[in-house]
Image (spheres, rainbow, N blue to C red):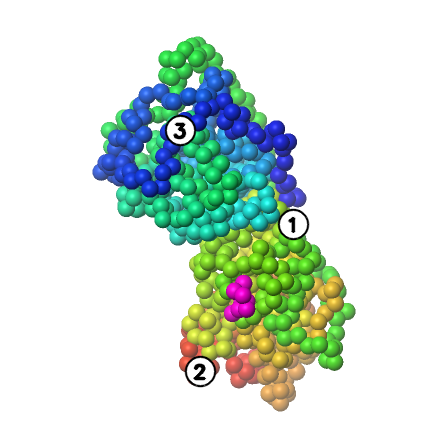
Amino acid sequence: MAKATRTKRTAAENAGDATTEEAKRSNGTTANSDQSKEATPSSSANGASADHSEFGDRTGPFDTTGFDDETIIEWYRRLHLGRRLDQKAALYLKMAKGWSYHAPYAGHDGIQLAIGKIFRSGKDFLFPYYRDMLTCLSAGLTVEELILNGLSKDGDVAGGGRHMSNHFAKPEVGIQNGSSCTGNHSLHAVGTGRAIKKLGGDEFSIYSGGESACSEGYFYEAVNVATLEKLPVIFTIQNNKFGISVPVREQTANTRVSDNFRGFSNLKIINCDGLDPFASFRAMQEARDYVLSGAGAAFVHADCDRIGSHSNSDNHELYRTQDEFDAMAKRDTLARYRKMLIDRKLLTETEIEEIEEQNKKLIFAAADVAEAAADPAPDSWKQFIVPESVVDYSDTSEANYSNDPKGEQLTLREAINVTMKEEFRRNPKTYLWGQDVASVNKQGIFNVPKGMLDEFGNERIFNAPIAEDSIVGTANGFCRYDDDIRVVVEGAEFADYFWPAMEQLIECTHDYWRTKGQFSPNITIRLASGGYIQGGLYHSQNLDAIFSHLPGLRVVCPAFASDAVGLMRNSIRSRGVTLYLEPKALYNFRPTSESKPGDDYIVPFGKGKIRRAGKDITIVTYGNALHKVLRAIKEIEKAGIDAEVIDLRTLRPWDRQMVFESVKKTNRALVAHEHYLTGGIGGEIAAAISSECFSFLDAPVGRVASKDCPVGFAQKLEGAILLQEKDVVEAVKATANY
């Protein structure tokens, strides 16, 4: 299945419902966009706004000034349709027919209708969250598409039932498939906003989420980047006063959550009544106009009610009072709207009932189609785990390469640098960011991207805040703007500092699978990895086994200059996410130096290389450990052992075919790596060899690695902890002489 291409609309269509209604309405607004205004709603015991005095009593009719009767009536049709569909979802659950996760949206009606109306399908980018049923219905998803999602059918346009129900999306028109990890899509929205600005687009990006996700650190990172770079991003916060059962007063000192963000420059804060569709639309329009002006990002804080429980697995009667339920019923958007139509004689009771009956029939008809639709085929799980690379295992272009010792020799560091420059010249939609990569004359703490700022400019090569989650998360969003975009990031200055970005890395690894191939983050994440530099804690650790554990991720680790070139080319040119581990002790290590390969040289993912042929034992290794093995060969030979050395080069996938063929020839195997022994990748390789080559083995598969201990700073400690040549020699002898 090819990546879905967002359907672009005509100029008139791009104006959409939002601008049509804009022309009909007046300039009046109930939104509060004065950032200096102090307003603290009185609070009840649970932290919710008790009298909602900021927006009046909120039990009467809405201010519809400037909206014509046709629009007002049509909005009721949409509001009622959404509410009935929300009730249908709960019914499916009770009948055990599907929708096993359901987060009702009642009490968010006004702001959700407004978000969908301001969004231009096929043009803008909408990042909804799991409660955004009406948002997505208003934005253009059909009732049938929503039910297909709820029932986890193969025809679900979000991803064919691969994600939880109530996670609505349609990437084809710009409604993004979001995670269940609350608030993490804020960074994706910001990344898309960055791409819009850098590529000169006239779109905007909308993040939608709840108030409790604003407590997440990465949400602050998102706001920081959006305001720093003045990006066209609208953060829409639906504050229903509860994070499941935790009241907002236990989440933050400011129960009006927007007050926590008043110190950000270039951020327009608009507080609106999220129960009121017209006030909410005015607020969203004001936010849209601001972000499209280039002045910065906008923050729309919508005061909502959560009429139902958090989800089907939550019972809100355990932590809320009957008085609260009664008060919310009086404020209910749908009931007030219906009464307003009758009081203003826009519709009679009979006419309203006709609309409601039409909605009921529409839902029943869509349900009949959706319920009969096919479920995902069980064996389809294996599809769309990783996108195809530009070359496959059978490619032999690297076989034509031979190191020319008389030619210019590139170190590992220089090889990476030269290749990135070539790829950036080849594709003008390639970008690089990270910490210290674009600081005048200091470009990268190890000088790997040296000269790239000078050649490609600050629009394509730029520094990022010291916020690793933001570095990776915005890369994910950036790729959503155009499938031709390629992003290279220094995920952290040292691999040890990458841990804050793990949440976003996990997101990247299942985006392609979760969307059924509709979206792939095309990112190369570079990390200076490993020890042997006397760096100690946070400067010498390995994460290779952690990364190699993750489906949907490629992990490569070059140990020679030619492989650094071939793997970098493959990483940047291919779709998908590649973790490009750079053993920093090898950056300027002369034995890694080789002459530059030709322009067609690409190393396939998952293809190892035999560094030394032998007949007595197979040593499987990579990275720093490979050079420890090669330097130990003389001692191994003195012991009368003829070892075959395989450089994996790629850790996920790794070359099972090459390893198994070698072991079947030598009948003995040893895996050597720098990472901890326990839980290291050597255990996986050893288990695979034992399983697939058991009848060929003359000895147990050996493993040798660093100690199960953090890498110490003192030279003596580092030497004792990390894998050394003597450890390799001893392990080879033990396995060979078994």
State the CA–CA distance, disc 2 to disc 3.
Answer: 67 Å
Q: Residues within 10 Å of mark 2 (few under 14, many from 20)?
A: some
**Amino acid under disc 1:** Asp
**213 over 689 or under it: above or below:** above
Task: Determine which residue is flagged by label 1.
Answer: 484
Question: Hey, what amino acid is under mark 3?
Answer: Thr
Q: Quadrant of the C terminus?
A: bottom right
Whole-percent x, y for residue 428 in the image? 66, 54
Q: Which residue is mark 2?
A: 715
Q: Residue 466 is drawn in which quadrant?
A: bottom left
Tell me, yes or no, if residue 222 can be seen here: no
Amino acid type at circle 2 is Gln
Q: Main secondary structure of the magenta part?
A: loop
Decide which of tag 2 and tag 3 comes sooner along the chain.
3
Residue 297 seen in render: yes
Q: Earlier in the sequence, mark 1 or mark 3?
A: 3
- Which residue is rendered at x = 56% and y = 29% of the image? 16
Q: Nearer the viewer, residue 496 or 725?
A: 496
Q: Are the residues at dot 2 and dot 3 in contact (C-beta closer than 8 Å)?
A: no
Give the residues in magenta.
438-445
Please tell me whether residue 442 belongs to the stretch shown in magenta: yes
Q: Secondary structure at mark 1?
A: loop
The residue that appears at 29% across and 27% down in the rendered structure is 56
Q: Which mark is residue 29?
A: 3
- Residue at screen point 54% across, 51% down: 476
